Image (tube, rainbow, N blue to C red):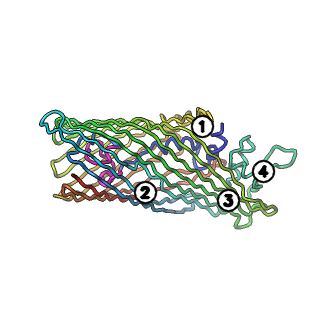
Amino acid sequence: MKKLTTILIVFLGFGFYSYSQNAQDALRFSQHYYGSTARSLSLSGAFGSLGGDFSSLSINPAGMGVYRKSEFTFTPSFGYNTALSTFNTAKLEDFNYDLGIGNIGLIGSFSTERDNGWKSFNIGFGYNKLNDFERVTAIKTIDANSSMLDQFENDINNGLEPTGTNLAIRSGLIYLMNENSNIWMSDITGTDYGQTLRHSVEENGYIGEYLFSAGANYEDMIYLGGSLGISSVRYNQITTHEEIDVEDNILQLNNFSYQQDLEISGSGVNFKAGVILKPVNWLRLGAAIHSPTFYNFHDTYSAAMESDLDSFSFEPQSASSEYDYELYTPPKFIGSASIILGKVALITADYERIDYSKAKLRGGGDGYTFAAENEGIQWIYDVSNNYRLGTEFRFGAISLRAGYAYFDSPYKSGELNQDADYQAISGGFGINNNSFYIDFGYSHYFGTEEYVLYQTPAAIASTDFVNNKLLCTVGFRF
């Protein structure tokens, strides 16, 4: 039961409504937003039936078979992300920037020199970034009508003592009513609220995938491919909660702060297989299946609390722990179709189906089975149907591109974030002279989520997230 009493139970109710950080881990590391190259990003990741781009190795590896020449590609990325929160009618916006690498890869194309049958075999290896976690969320109200201390008080009076509640006891923020009583109270009682409340969540990290792929071309009509993916995950979340009695409305409390730091690192393995069919020159049909990614994770958690009371002075209190466990993400299916209008234009579409309720947590480092957490995953999450559309127009060596994507909410009906779908609008252009090309792509990704600061009573903020990403891909063919 160490998992429940150290790293993860502390998040129960702090940041997510009616489910624990375990379920959030299962969702967070199962979601991918394709667009590791500038061309793919410009088409909103709708590359399942196109191929000939390194991003297809992570979407439909049959795209490997489309290559006619060997190729090296490299993509630096720049992101600008904003989060606008609304809590008790108060609005607050924060932002951050990030720099990174979207892609680096090498394709080797080998012709069989045959006019019929298997015409070429290609191999490729490299790296695609599948998700960014760069986000800063700031929430504030200057006239709070509840407190996180209400949550701590409710926990201990119901026989629970997660990390935050334990630190609150040690910091003098909650205490026994008297020596003969089993009833705990907090330093904010009755209607003594009105304090300034600040809450911030700073997230950063990524999911990256190292790929080893192979593909083949049969009669310029059937393209087959497979990829072995080695996933790498880094995630860090710093959550800071402060309450300050600016107006001196509270008898004992001047202020307190509570900070939590969660670091997750892990690696996993998966396999992808796909096919692209070209029944006629103007049509391509694609299908791909992705196995679960089998992850091993290591979590490091620390928390610290400080308090300033009228009658007492407490030293800062802290706690820390580490934990190892496994996660199996859900498998997914991708179906695709493209219309190719010669060398002038194309229209492409992808459909992706993923059942997030199939995610599983396993192998707790102390033998914990995660039975309750896996039941929660099945109860909370549902099937997501995601759609990606893209179009490209070519004017000689110059290409203009645009795309749109819709990502269905992974939550079941009745859950707090049942309507938390996301959309992306994208565009870009490229210059191609056969042996060298350069592409630029831009994506505007946006959506709204409900965020719970604490559960008792439920303090819910609505946050509008926007992720702006700019990629530049440089490629050499030989």
The residue shown at (54%, 34%) is 362
* Mark 2 Cα-neighbour bin, 10 Å: few <14, some 14–19, many ≥20: many
Count every numbered label the image shows and give the total.
4
**In front here: 334 or 294?**
294
Label number found at residue 446: none
Q: Mark 1 or mark 4, which is nearer the start of the sequence?
A: 4
Q: Position of residue 436 (x, y in %)?
A: 22, 57
180 displayed left or right of 305: right
Q: Mark 3 or mark 4, which is nearer the start of the sequence?
A: 4
Q: Which residue is mark 2?
A: 467
**In front here: 147 or 294?**
294
**Residue 146 visible in rendering:** no
Q: Amino acid at mark 2?
A: Asn
Q: Position of residue 193 (x, y in %)?
A: 71, 59
Q: Amino acid at mark 4?
A: Met
What span is colored magenta in the figure? 35-57
Label number found at residue 185: 4
Q: Is residue 245 magenta?
A: no
Q: Which residue is mark 3?
A: 257
